Amino acid sequence: MMNIHHLELFYYVACHGGISRAVRHIPYGIQQPAVSSQILLLEADLGRKLFNRNPFRLTPEGEQLLAHIQPFFENLETVAARLRKGSSPLIRIGAPELVLREYLPKIIQLLRKKHPDVRLSLQSGFTPQLEAWLLDRQIDLAVTPLENRPPAHLRCLRLMRVPLVLLVHKRSKFKAATEIWAQGRITDPLIILPAVETISRLFKKGLQRIRIDWPPTIEASSLENVTQYVADGYGIGVNVNLPGVARHPQVRILPLDGFEPLEIAALWHGEPTPLIRAVLEEGQRYIAKSWPEWQCKDQELSA
């Protein structure tokens, strides 16, 4: 049986007159070499050359295949719209567990006032997982920490910039981060998220700027666990200064002056649907009310 994904790629190549042009129109992230290799697999499966590369021109077999598959791919959105008509709208959102538990419910509560019948599908994950799910179209919207530029082929709305902080036990002798740096060689265990996470990468960059070497001792699975491990006396933790995350009666918060803040952004494909737009607008309003000092005020959701 022919691979449907290979047929889809051939459809875009045939309609746009070449692989490089097709890549610019395929509605998900895929690189030119990947398209080329998968088209070759399709040709090998069929035992026929489907088009000449330079200049581009379909072979008779390519024209025959395009005529057969073109109505299917061109009518997919029409059929999908017809099937969705009359059903409750669905939005699939991916975010860190903290966002899904502490903050998204408040945004959804506001959203339901305007869209009472909206259905939700929620997935929690770290940044690499969320970006992969979005590129694979497993979710519609990701709310995630962002470092530097967003991934190619994705739209981005920067929502807020939250300061990084160190957490020490309330009985700790340290009253400021500079007292920790002044030791030279730090012996206290470091509790932090996995190295692939943006907060860990930002902290490492900050340490490099001040020429401090402090390898992690405990990799925690969540920011809440970082706080709890510090409260239990296992070491010093890296966190963000958000209510409900870094605050604990057994923990003292030390600002990390000079360290880059953690930037939280929303990512999605193409023009935002009305439902995605509504979630983003409610999210911006919630952040402006709750943390106006950290909101990315220079960001607007384009029309």
Image (spheres, helix red, strand yellow):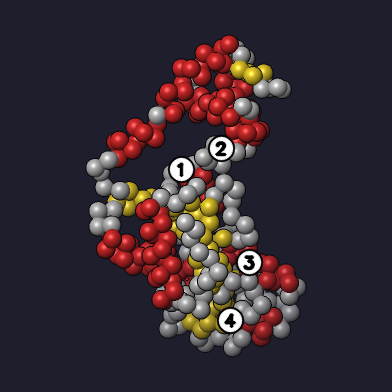
Q: Which numbered circle lies on residue 260?
A: none
Mark 2 vs mark 4, CA separation in Å:
45 Å
Residue placed at 54% from the left, 49% from the top? 154
Asked whether residue 253 appears in the rendered view, the answer is yes
Residue placed at 63% from the left, 63% from the top? 201
Q: Secondary structure at mark 4?
A: strand
**Mark earlier in primary sequence (1, 3):** 1
Mark 3 vs mark 4, CA separation in Å:
14 Å
**Mark earlier in primary sequence (2, 1):** 2
Number of residue marks: 4
Amino acid type of disc 4?
A: Pro
Q: Nearer the viewer, mark 1 or mark 3?
A: 1
Relative horizontal placement of residue 254, taking residue 112 as reference (left or right):
right
Q: Which residue is denoted by mark 1 in the rendering?
A: 137
Amino acid type of disc 3?
A: Leu
Mark 1 vs mark 3, CA separation in Å:
28 Å
Q: Which residue is denoted by mark 3 in the rendering?
A: 202
Residue placed at 61% from the left, 78% from the top? 256
From this view, report whether residue 157 is shown above or below residue 16.
Answer: below
Q: Position of residue 148 (x, y in %)?
A: 63, 60
Q: Secondary structure at mark 3?
A: helix
Residues at circles 1 and 3 in contact by the CB criterion of under 8 Å: no
**Mark earlier in primary sequence (2, 4):** 2
Q: Which residue is denoted by mark 2 in the rendering?
A: 25
Mark 2 vs mark 1, CA separation in Å:
16 Å
From this view, report whether residue 1 is shown above or below residue 237.
Answer: above
Instruction: Quadrant for residue 18, please give it.
Output: top right
Residue placed at 50% from the left, 64% from the top? 300
Amino acid type of disc 1?
A: Arg
Q: Which residue is denoted by mark 4 in the rendering?
A: 255
Q: Position of residue 299 (x, y in %)?
A: 53, 65
